[in-house]
Image (spheres, rainbow, N blue to C red):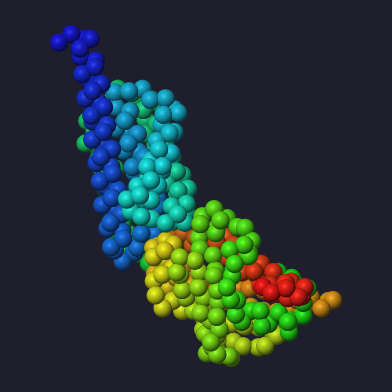
Amino acid sequence: MNDRETVPTMRRRDNWRFVAAILVALAAAFAVYMMAEAGAGGAIGYALMVVLPAALSAFIAWAGSIGRRWSRGTFLAVPLWLAFAATAIGAIVLREGVVCLVMVLPFWVGFGYLGIWPVYLYRRSRWSVDPATFRAHALLLLPFLALLVDQQVAPPRETRTVVREIIVDAPAAAVWPRLLAIPAIAPDEGRWNISQDLLRLPRPVAAHLTGEGPGAVRDARWQDDIRFQEIVTGWRPGEALQWRFAFPDPSIHQRTDRHIEPHGRHLWIDSGGYRLIPLAGGRTRIRLWTRYHLATPFNAYAGWWGERILGDIQDNVLSVVAGRIENRTRGETP
């Protein structure tokens, strides 16, 4: 075999080796995902969010650059393509929700770059290396080791409260009955927000009150047949309304994101309420708050998302209430 025949043969062999490496990496990633889902630590942990993207990016960059002089741009493209592939597989095959995918994406890109950096530095200084890919397979063991840590170490717990306000041109006595029940919310009511218009989270449809005083129940319905309850724990007419959340069925996480279980191991939506604050000129400030508990290794990051998602939902509800109060002031039917 002459040199002209040897070069294409080596390239084909390197290409097949690279394809095999990608298949092995995907199989390892799927195994880590399934083990994390089934384990006590849950899917939100260091193994899936940090170690897996770093290890996969390093492994693919190592295997792909064997026998090739990859440019810096090619190395930098690996985490992006990997994150894109993980998002597509998560959405199509694993049926993950858009909120989960958007939250995970920055981790996969950022830690993917952390993983390829030592590979790039090594390749830049030493291109002639042992072409065997089996030595790089040890990288794929790291997510499994991290998974063991996730299963054994309890994540820190934290309590957060999201608060939003709106001012309406009406006294508290006129505002109060509009908070107790919100029937038949039309599609054009409320306000535009990122969570419900771009991320496509469901919007509220109606809220009905049964009973009065502590123990009364507000039955809330959202789009996609989502249902939950707000059990009244505090009742001060014209001043404040407080409740604890109850979720009698799994409709929220089944129709939005199965990792966002409102009474789950990572998230516990606890309580909420309204407070009416009288202002000068017969106006009222309506304050809506929601308290929830977090238990993840990334509480600061998850809390940042909680502030935005719950804040968007609260802003939308307050906009509906304010719009109906304005309609009543003008003598219109909501």
Question: Residue 52: x, y in percent?
Answer: 35, 48
Q: Residue at x 54, y 65 (%)?
A: 203
Q: Position of residue 79 (x, y in %)?
A: 41, 39
- Give the quarter of the figure containing the N terminus: top left
Q: Quadrant of residue 113?
A: top left
Residue at position x 46%, y 59% in the image:
298
The answer to whether residue 16 is above or below residue 29 is above
Q: In screen coordinates, is 88 left or right of 220?
A: left
Image quadrant holding the C terminus, namely: bottom right
**Image quadrant where residue 67 sits:** top left
- Residue 79 appears in view: no
Number of numbered tags placed on the structure image? 0
Can you name the residue that lies furthest to the left here? 1
Q: Is residue 281 above or below residue 77?
A: below
Between residue 151 and residue 200, name the one nearer to us. Answer: 200
Q: Is residue 64 above or below residue 202?
A: above
At x 60% / y 76%, what residue is drawn?
Answer: 182
List x then y, in percent, for residue 156. Answer: 44, 67
- In-image side of 183 versus 47 (left or right): right
Image check: 20 left or right of 275? Answer: left
Q: Residue furthest right?
A: 281
- Front residue of this view, candidates 290 and 266: 290
